[in-house]
Image: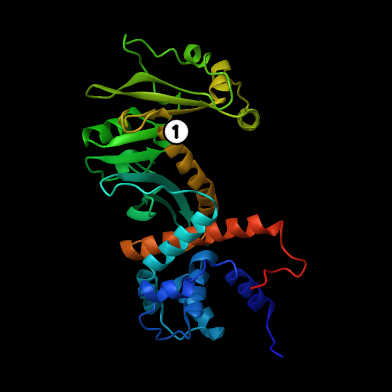
């Protein structure tokens, strides 16, 4: 009778949640052209996840892998393995994302839709460094086409569209943290298109008459759950006006109540009073876009932002997981692989939670 430890049992349970064909993908993506130092694809992935999910340094990871009889490699060899596993980890993320029910539509190859975001990473220890990651993912393939690491303080380190190189024709989606006139102007001058969640305190909107856009008044006509609307608006940049559309969807009553409770808790912590317009705007999703109206009417604009938000729900787990770990800071390929590894752990956690309610009494899924 085989004598498994609790850790081995936990690992076997975790493997049962991996995407189908995960070992074949390792060979297909050439992550394991040679196993050299590892006994199998399984021990390779287990070692990589020990580094990424547990936050151990490369040196500590290889020491623990050696003690567990998983691998006999150096920290330099593990870094090379991490680099070569980039496509493997990305493919696993794609499969798990599809399992969440998020439908990534097929796009024309000429259409490049990019989700941009940022997160903080705090390395282990009382004196561990803190870094900000800026990254861009292309849809529908989840290709990380840009990855930058900056300090968390000082000029030019905050979240902004200006952190990202863009090309003419890019369709860029960002959340409230990217909602500034300077960022929108940067994309427009590069002949890229933007869809960004509106932060009404950071982005003044104007109408054709050069007066402030009467947002509260216009929202009075959008009162039913699921009702959508759009209006032409402009943003004032440093060099001129930027015309676009304000796309609006009213939230469900449940979502409204959740948003209002969150605002009230935040105001209570800060000892501040909420303005009436803040409570009003919390009942809607507001997106400013310069995406062409013929190609992207109001509903597709909101659908694409909703897709970004669905992925963001998974990335919230990534952001909490990413607070621990030794981030490869000087190598783009290993940094991207590290990011895909973090996302894989986040998606796997998400899947485990989904299945937890339906776990069998013996604690795992039968093959």
Q: Position of residue 338 (x, y in %)?
A: 42, 63
Residue 323 in view here: no
* Residue 267 drawn above or below residue 18: above
Quadrant where the N terminus is found in the figure:
bottom right
* Direction bottom: furthest residue: 1
**In the picture provided, is 64 more to the left or to the right than 166?**
right
Q: Residue at x 39, y 64 (%)?
A: 337
Q: In which quarter of the view is residue 157 placed?
A: top left
Q: Secondary structure at mark 1?
A: helix
Q: Nearer the viewer, residue 70 or 172?
A: 172
Q: Position of residue 99 (x, y in %)?
A: 53, 56
Badge 1 local density, few (<14 within 10 Å), some, or many (20+)? many
Q: Residue at x 53, y 22 (%)?
A: 281
**In the picture provided, is 32 more to the left or to the right than 222?**
left
Name the residue tied to disc 1: 302
Q: In which quarter of the view is residue 189 placed?
A: top left
* Direction right: furthest residue: 361
* Residue 6 drawn above or below residue 231: below
**In the picture provided, is 102 more to the left or to the right than 270?**
left
Q: Position of residue 234 (x, y in %)?
A: 32, 20
Colouring style: rainbow
Q: Position of residue 255 (x, y in %)?
A: 61, 32
Quadrant where the C terminus is found in the figure:
bottom right
**In the picture provided, is 258 more to the left or to the right than 148?**
right
Q: Nearer the viewer, residue 179 or 154?
A: 179
Q: Nearer the viewer, residue 162 or 14?
A: 14
Q: Residue at x 39, y 28 (%)?
A: 288
Q: How many marks?
A: 1
Q: Residue at x 28, y 49 (%)?
A: 109
* Residue 239 drawn above or below residue 307: above
């Amino acid at each position: 009778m085989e004598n498994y430890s609790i850790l081995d049992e936990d690992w076997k349970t975790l493997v049962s949640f991996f995407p189908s064909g995960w070992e074949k993908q390792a060979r297909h993506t050439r992550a394991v052209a040679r196993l050299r130092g590892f006994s199998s694809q399984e021990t390779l992935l287990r070692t990589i996840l020990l580094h990424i999910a547990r936050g151990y340094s490369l040196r500590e990871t290889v020491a623990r892998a050696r003690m567990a009889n998983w691998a006999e490699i150096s920290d330099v060899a593990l870094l090379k393995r991490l680099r070569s596993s980039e496509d493997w980890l990305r493919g696993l993320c794609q499969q798990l994302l599809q399992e969440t029910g998020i439908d990534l539509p097929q796009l024309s190859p000429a259409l490049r839709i990019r989700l941009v975001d940022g997160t903080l990473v705090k390395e282990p220890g009382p004196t561990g460094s803190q870094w900000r990651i800026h990254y861009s993912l292309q849809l529908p393939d989840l290709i990380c086409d840009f990855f930058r690491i900056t300090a968390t303080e000082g000029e030019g380190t905050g979240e902004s569209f200006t952190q990202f190189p863009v090309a003419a024709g890019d369709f860029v989606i960002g959340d409230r943290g990217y909602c500034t006139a300077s960022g929108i102007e940067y994309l427009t001058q590069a002949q890229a298109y933007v869809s960004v969640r509106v932060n009404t305190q950071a982005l003044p909107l104007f109408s054709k008459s050069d007066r402030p856009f009467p947002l509260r008044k216009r929202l009075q006509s959008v009162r039913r759950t699921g009702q959508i609307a759009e209006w032409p608006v402009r943003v004032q940049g440093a060099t001129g006006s930027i015309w676009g559309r304000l796309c609006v969807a009213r939230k469900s009553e449940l979502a409204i109540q959740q948003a209002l409770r969150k605002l009230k808790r935040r105001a209570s912590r800060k000892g501040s009073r909420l303005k009436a317009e803040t409570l009003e705007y919390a009942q809607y999703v507001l997106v400013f876009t310069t995406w062409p109206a013929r190609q992207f009417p109001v509903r597709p604009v909101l659908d694409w932002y909703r897709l970004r938000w669905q992925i963001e729900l998974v990335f919230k787990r990534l952001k909490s997981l990413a607070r621990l770990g030794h981030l490869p800071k000087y190598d783009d390929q290993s940094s991207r692989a590290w990011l895909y590894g973090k996302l894989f752990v986040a998606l796997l956690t998400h899947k485990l939670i989904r299945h937890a309610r339906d776990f069998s009494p013996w604690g795992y899924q039968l093959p």
